[in-house]
Image (spheres, rainbow, N blue to C red):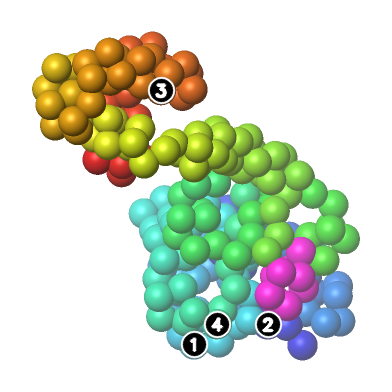
Amino acid sequence: MIRVVIADDIPILRQGLGAILGQDPELTVVGLAADGREAWELCKKTKPDVVLMDMRMPQYDGSWGIRRIKSDFPAIKVLVLTTFDDAQTVEAAVGSGADGYVLKEMEDSRLLQSVKAVCGGIRVFGDSVFEGLRRQMIPVKKQMEQVAGITDREREIMRCVARGMDNKEIAAELFLAEGTVRNNISKLLEKLKLKDRTQLAVFTVKNQLD
């Protein structure tokens, strides 16, 4: 039997979710909470397997509840069930330690499956949530590929640029011809799709190449 705590600030939704989960013989609702703090307190008392957590609640929101629950009861799984799939809310949930993130618009049968999957150690994300995370990862992956393609010599030049050195100073520092430095910087700007030395310096610092 999977023990579940439901946290939502709207009483009728808490009760409705409890009724839905109660229809499944493998699930039992052991507590209803109005915010993240109540959910955390119920975890101390009832020792659930899964907490079904809304994100936007007054005073102690979902992020607060997730952080405290994961800190004090790391074995308890937290599945976010909310109306919002914007990047800021998703990042807050995932960054706090949520094990899954689904939307309230999903069918009852899928919600029951999601609770069981999260309890079994599977991270569950709704389609729109997963697509949002995937889009965020594309530029990160592209940037990592760009960094991986930078040679040791180019890194040395980038470090000098980040320190504010001009071509003549870089040439003296690295024992290169000034023209070689200029050509290397031009190739770097083209390779990394950057406009000027300022952007190159920012890229160097941002990717901890300095």
Does the CB distance between marks 3 and 2 fall below 8 Å? no
Residue displayed at 79% across by 49% down: 106
The structure residue drawn at horizontal position 68% and vertical position 82%, both measured from the top left corner, is 3
Q: Relative to 69, say whether 158 is above or below.
A: above
Q: Which label number is shown at residue 3?
A: 2
Magenta-colored segment: predominant secondary structure: helix
Q: Amino acid at mark 1?
A: Lys
Question: What's under tag 3, amino acid-wise?
Answer: Leu
> Which label's residue is closer to the chain start, 3 or 2?
2
Residue 28 position (above or below residue 182): below
Q: Residues within 10 Å of mark 2 (few under 14, many from 20)?
A: some
Q: Earlier in the sequence, mark 1 or mark 2?
A: 2
Residue 188's disc number? 3
Marks 4/3: CA–CA distance: 47 Å
Please report whichever mark, 3 or 1, sits nearer to the chain's N-terminal start. Answer: 1
Quarter in which the C terminus is drawn: top left
> Would you say 207 lies left or right of 145 here?
left
Q: Is residue 118 magenta?
A: yes
Provide the residue span drawn in magenta. Answer: 114-122
Identify the mark nearer the N-term, 4 or 1: 1
Which residue was labeled with disc 4?
75
